[in-house]
Image: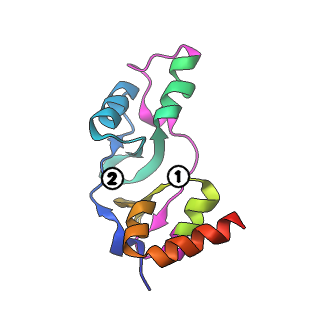
Amino acid sequence: MTTARDLMTVDPVSIRETDSLVVAARTMRDRALFSLPVCAEGKRLTGVITDRDIVVGCVADGGDPWTTTAGQLAEGTPVVVTADGGIEEALQLMATKRVRRLPVVDESGRLVGDLHEAAVAIALPELAIAQARRTRA
């Protein structure tokens, strides 16, 4: 069985809970990303923040992106896949949650990778196509 560990990007870009939204936005701009994992000490994943979160959750409400932290905006339980989780499970989760990228965590919740649907499509095109067909039916 192919696992998330087999196809993930190792050591993904992330930000700390205490980083400002300006740091988050600049990191997204510089790395051409639309979302970033948010981590506490020891790379423990606590959330994910998107460019839309910054605009809608802070700027549009008159918030200050210099003083608002990523941790304040990244609320709720992040959608993740475990490193040893199967790719079919990951694709199903992506389809259900309507995301293209999943943080990959180890058994302790530490961020260890990043799984993008493009990596699955390249490595296992038959599986990705079959999964896409199932979710559209």
Q: SS for tag 2? A: helix
| Vertical position of residue 2 compared to residue 56: above or below | below
Res 44 → quadrant: bottom left
Q: Which residue lies furthest to the right in this view?
A: 137
Among numbered discs 2 and 1, the one appearing first in the sequence: 2
Residue 38 versus residue 51: which sits nearer the camera?
51
Residue for point 45% across, 16% down: 64
Q: Mark 1 points at which residue?
A: 78
Residue 99 coordinates in the image, percent (x, y): 54, 53
Residue for point 44% across, 24% down: 68
Q: SS for tag 1? A: loop
Query: In the rendered structure, which amino acid carries the disc numbered 1?
Result: Pro
Q: For the N terminus, which image quadrant? A: bottom left
Q: Residue 19 carries which label?
A: none
Query: In the rendered structure, which amino acid carries the disc numbered 2?
Result: Lys
Q: Mark 1: few, some, or many residues within 10 Å (few <14, many ≥20)?
A: some
Q: Which colour scheme is used?
A: rainbow
Characterize the magenta stretch by its predominant secondary structure. loop
* Residue 19 visible from this viewpoint: no
* Residue 59 visible from this viewpoint: yes
Q: Is residue 63 left or right of residue 9?
A: right
Q: For the C terminus, which image quadrant? A: bottom right
**Magenta part of the chain:** 61-90
| Labels 2, 1: front one | 1
Q: Does the magenta stretch include residue 12?
A: no
Residue for point 31% across, 62% down: 9
Residue 70 coordinates in the image, percent (x, y): 43, 34
Q: Does the magenta stretch include residue 86?
A: yes
Residue 22 coordinates in the image, percent (x, y): 36, 25
Q: Mark 2 points at which residue?
A: 43
Residue 126 coordinates in the image, percent (x, y): 49, 78
> Label 1 near label 2: C-beta < 8 Å?
no
